[in-house]
């Protein structure tokens, strides 16, 4: 998410033309003359690869207020628009026309509107140099207000959105496993998160690559452009107090060991000047802080382990310490885990969770400036966008909120939750420029079971259940879900307030074993990973919906990988 419009969109390091953007106004035109131009267009390429690119366009209207608008430009090369958002976009030859959607046609004097699109090209992706708004020629913003090559900078030297204008690291270990699967080469070039889930992972456990090896590989992939490396920092004392499959190696009181043997060594490696040119995104301790909100005290979902972690404060202390140590490194971008809409979307969880996050972000020397943003749906399955119903719908006078599936939640999908939760986080004191990430690695819910439209209006339940993309038995089910599919491919700045869609959980890595398996990784057996389990209070006492024959969490699960590809949406 941007702290300044031009800064967010200033990512042009990969443009072959080299200059980034061209001004349509002579350099000697004065400030007043530029201000008198009736419109300004800021066109920026946010990311680019061998055959395609993602672009964002912001139009500022300096003339009379408008109730509708039309922006036009032409390409000098063979660029073709392939998909778009926040606009109705058409192309004829090299000429492109972007018209308003029904919801963003109003454009007051001095106000701006933004839209984006994906495109294909070959050769050189030259920038268009002339734009019109309703037939009137606009000034082209040269982006001089932002820090070039990466989306603008804040006073710390960090860019506003690390994903803007950058490639993202493809983990060669995961890529090799994916490519070895039948059909896996279709996605084996996608970027995924590298999980540091125990102390041994820092130097490489069981023959796998350690942190330095991954960073060295990222430098090799980087070339002359920008490169993001995604790390999951995940070894808190008493980790995952409400689940057993992902329990960790550290006991509830091992806070000093967490600091000195886990966070400090990671920080020392990331601080190495050798890696200063990388943009290192850290996902901080998934599932930890949300557990303090929902699984403690007198709640039916409470566990003794979560009560312990609330009482001793080591989740808050550990997260605060990690944010402070890693946030002090100029090229590290901390994103704090924020659960998902099916966890924190209820009224009694939403605001309290933001308050707990603020507490952790100001503990152990951390400040809100150490938080780049938040990530939702990490390693989870909540649908990105439910198109067949909204939270405001009613059926025969009954609100969708009263359906068994929604169960009084305020949100029905991850995108609406992430955008609303971002606003809540800012309201409790986080910086207004924070951005959100959404893990879309397993929330596609495509395949033959994907509904083509709304459900029958016989009742609110038939309406919701017949139309929802998320086919889980219960929204509380989280382990190796049957029927799940790959979601949106990783993408920078896909929607308002969203820094990126990411695959932080590598598809094909198990959530937990279906049966008890002895191991030296501190991982227990959680019945929620057993397909015969009939549930608990956290999933409404329903079947777990888990796939059978699953290995330990983090281990390769071929059957799940095949399931995810089969049910991918968008389809492979």
Image (spheres, rainbow, N blue to C red):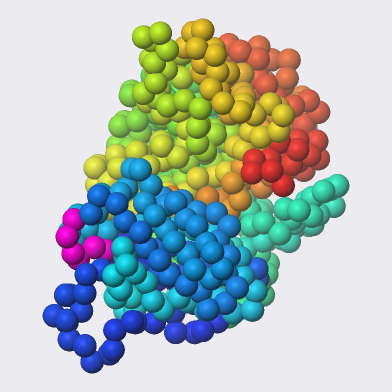
Measured along the vertical axis of the image, is residue 14 above or below residue 404?
below
Q: In which quarter of the image is the N terminus?
A: bottom left
Side of 86 where 139 appears, left or right: left
Measured along the vertical axis of the image, is residue 355 above or below residue 405?
below
Residue 204: in sight, yes or no? yes
Side of 129 where 565 appears, left or right: right
Outermost residue on the left side: it is 32
- Residue 304 in percent (x, y) is at 49, 21
In the image, what residue occupies the spot 41% across and 40% down? 418
Q: Which residues are the magenta region?
A: 59-65
Residue nearer the viewer, 109 or 559: 109
Side of 434 where 383 appears, left or right: right
- Residue 9 in percent (x, y) is at 39, 66
Side of 234 where 116 appears, left or right: left
Outermost residue on the bottom side: it is 28
- Residue 164 in percent (x, y) is at 47, 64
In the image, what residue occupies the spot 35% across and 34% down? 353
Residue nearer the viewer, 195 or 130: 130
Residue 554: in sight, yes or no? no
Q: How many labels does the image show?
A: 0
State which quadrant residue 547 falls in: top right
In the image, what residue occupies the spot 33% across and 24% down? 347
Residue nearer the viewer, 242 or 528: 528
In the image, what residue occupies the spot 42% across and 12% down? 395
Magenta stretch encompasses residue 124? no
Measured along the vertical axis of the image, is residue 245 above or below residue 151?
above
- Residue 99 in percent (x, y) is at 39, 55
């Amino acid at each position: 998410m941007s702290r300044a419009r031009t800064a967010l969109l200033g990512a042009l390091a990969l443009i072959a033309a080299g200059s980034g953007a061209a001004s349509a106004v002579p350099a000697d035109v004065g400030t007043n003359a530029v201000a008198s131009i009736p419109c300004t267009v800021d066109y920026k390429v946010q990311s680019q690869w061998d055959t395609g690119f993602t672009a964002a366009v912001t139009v500022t209207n300096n003339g009379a207020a408008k109730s509708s608008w039309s922006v036009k430009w032409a390409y000098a090369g063979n660029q073709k628009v392939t998909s778009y958002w926040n606009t109705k976009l058409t192309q004829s030859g090299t000429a492109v026309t972007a018209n308003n959607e029904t919801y963003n046609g109003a454009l007051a004097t001095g106000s701006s509107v933004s839209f984006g699109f994906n495109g294909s090209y070959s050769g050189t992706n030259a920038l268009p140099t002339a734009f019109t708004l309703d037939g009137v020629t606009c000034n082209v913003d040269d982006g001089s207000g932002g820090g070039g090559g990466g989306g603008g900078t804040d006073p710390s030297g960090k860019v506003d959105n690390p994903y803007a204008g950058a490639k993202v690291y493809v983990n060669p270990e995961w890529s090799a496993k994916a490519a070895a699967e039948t059909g896996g080469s279709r996605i084996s070039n996608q970027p995924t998160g590298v999980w540091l889930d125990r102390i041994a992972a820092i130097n490489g456990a069981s023959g796998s690559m350690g942190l330095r090896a991954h960073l060295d590989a990222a430098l090799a992939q980087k070339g002359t452009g920008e490169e993001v490396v995604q790390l999951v920092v995940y070894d808190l004392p008493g980790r995952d107090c409400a689940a057993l499959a992902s329990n960790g190696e550290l006991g509830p009181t091992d806070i000093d060991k967490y600091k000195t043997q886990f966070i400090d060594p990671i920080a020392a490696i990331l601080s190495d000047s050798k890696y200063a040119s990388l943009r290192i995104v850290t996902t901080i301790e998934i599932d930890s802080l949300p557990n303090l909100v929902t699984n403690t005290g007198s709640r039916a979902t409470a566990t003794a382990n979560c009560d312990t972690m609330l009482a001793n404060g080591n989740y808050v202390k550990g997260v605060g310490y990690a944010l402070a140590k890693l946030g002090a490194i100029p090229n590290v971008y901390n994103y704090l885990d924020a659960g998902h809409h099916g966890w924190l979307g209820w009224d009694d969880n939403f605001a309290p969770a933001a308050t707990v996050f603020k507490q952790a972000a100001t503990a152990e020397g951390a400040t809100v400036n150490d938080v780049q943003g938040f990530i939702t749906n990490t390693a989870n399955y909540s649908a990105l966008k439910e198109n067949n119903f909204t939270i405001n719908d009613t059926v025969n006078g009954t609100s969708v909120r009263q359906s068994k599936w929604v169960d009084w939640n305020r949100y029905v999908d991850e995108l609406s939750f992430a955008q609303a939760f971002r606003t809540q986080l800012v309201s409790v004191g986080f910086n207004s420029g924070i951005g959100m990430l959404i893990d879309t690695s397993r929330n596609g819910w495509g395949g033959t079971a994907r509904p083509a439209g709304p459900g029958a209006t016989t009742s609110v339940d038939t309406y919701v259940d017949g139309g929802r993309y998320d086919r889980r038995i219960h929204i509380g089910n989280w382990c190796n879900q049957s029927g799940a599919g790959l979601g949106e491919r990783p993408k920078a700045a896909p929607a308002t307030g969203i820094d990126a869609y990411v695959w932080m959980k590598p598809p094909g890595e198990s959530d937990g074993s279906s049966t008890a398996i002895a191991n030296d990784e501190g991982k227990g057996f959680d019945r929620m990973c057993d397909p015969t389990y009939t549930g608990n209070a956290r999933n409404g006492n329903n079947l777990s919906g888990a796939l059978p024959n699953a290995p330990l969490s983090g281990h390769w699960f071929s059957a799940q990988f095949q399931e995810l590809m089969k049910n991918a949406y968008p389809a492979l």
